[in-house]
Amino acid sequence: MRILMVCLGNICRSPLAEGIMQHLATANGLNWEVDSAGTGNWHVGEGPDRRSTRAAGNHGIDISKQVCRLFRESDFDEFDHIFVMDKNNLRDVLALARNDEDAQKVKLLLGDKVVPDPYYDDTQFEPVFMLIEGGCKDIIKELTNS
Ligand code: 4NP
C-alpha cells in the first residue's frame, strides 16, 4: 500500500502524518510506503518545521530527515490513497485530478473533520499530533478491516 499525506506547506502537518502513519504501519507489521507533499512551494527542499520535529520526537518518531516537496500530478499514479489535511488541500489536489480514478484516491485524513494549520500557533503542535495519530489509527483499521 502506498499512501501520500498532503498539506499546504509540507513542513508542519503532512510531515507529522507521514511519520506517524509510517511508524504505526511498521509497528503493525504492514509493508506500507508513506510519503508527504505540499500544495504550496515556499519550503521545497527544506526539512520539517522544528516544532513538528519536536512534537514527533516527543512521541519517539524521527521526522527530521524528511524533505519538503510539491504535490505533482504523477502522485495520482504513484499512490493508492492521498490523504489531505483540510478543505483547501482537498480543493487544490482535486483540481489536478485527471479523471474519476484520480479523484477517488483523495480524502480528508479525518474523514469529515479538518486538521487545523498549527503554523501560527506554537501550542497547537501537540494537539495536531494527537488528531493526526487518531486519524491514522482509524485509516489502518479501515484499510486492514481490523
Ligand atoms: P502546513 O503548515 O501546511 O501544515 O505545512 C504551513 C506551513 C507553512 C506555511 C503555511 C502552512 N506557509 O505559508 O509558509
Image: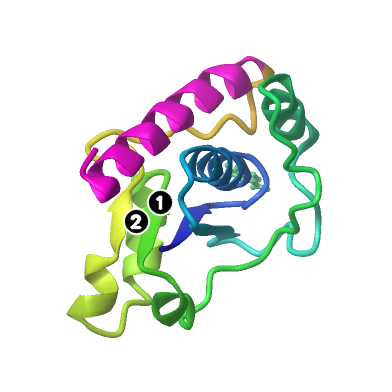
Which corner quadrant holds the C terminus?
top left
Task: Kindly identify the residue that appears in the image at 47 percent across and 29 percent down.
Answer: 133
Label 2, label 1: how far apart the Cα atoms are:
6 Å
> Mark 2 or mark 1, which has the lower sequence index?
1
Question: Where does label 2 land, which residue?
Answer: 90
User: Which portion, as a residue range, is magenta?
Assistant: 123-146
Residue 106 position within the rendered picture, expressed as x and y whole percent measured from the top left: 31, 61
Residue 130 position within the rendered picture, expressed as x and y whole percent measured from the top left: 49, 21
Give the main secondary structure of the magenta stretch.
Answer: helix
Say whether residue 135 is magenta: yes
Residue extending farthest to the top is: 123
Question: Where does label 1 land, which residue?
Answer: 84
- Label 1 CA crowd tier, 10 Å (few <14, some 14–19, many 20+): many
Q: Amino acid at mark 2?
A: Leu
Task: Kindly identify the residue that appears in the image at 36 percent across and 68 percent down.
Answer: 80
| Mark seen at residue 57 | none
Q: Secondary structure at mark 2?
A: helix
Q: Secondary structure at mark 1?
A: strand
How is the rendered protein coloured? rainbow
Mark 2 or mark 1, which is nearer to you? 1
- The image shows residue 88, relative to residue 37, as above or below, that is above
- The image shows residue 52, relative to residue 78, as above or below, that is above
Residue 31 position within the rendered picture, expressed as x and y whole percent measured from the top left: 49, 57
Which corner quadrant holds the N terminus?
bottom left
Tell me whether circle 2 and circle 1 mark residues in contact (CB < 8 Å): yes
Residue 50 position within the rendered picture, expressed as x and y whole percent measured from the top left: 80, 34
Task: Kindly identify the residue that appears in the image at 79 percent across and 63 percent down.
Answer: 45
Q: Amino acid at mark 1?
A: Val
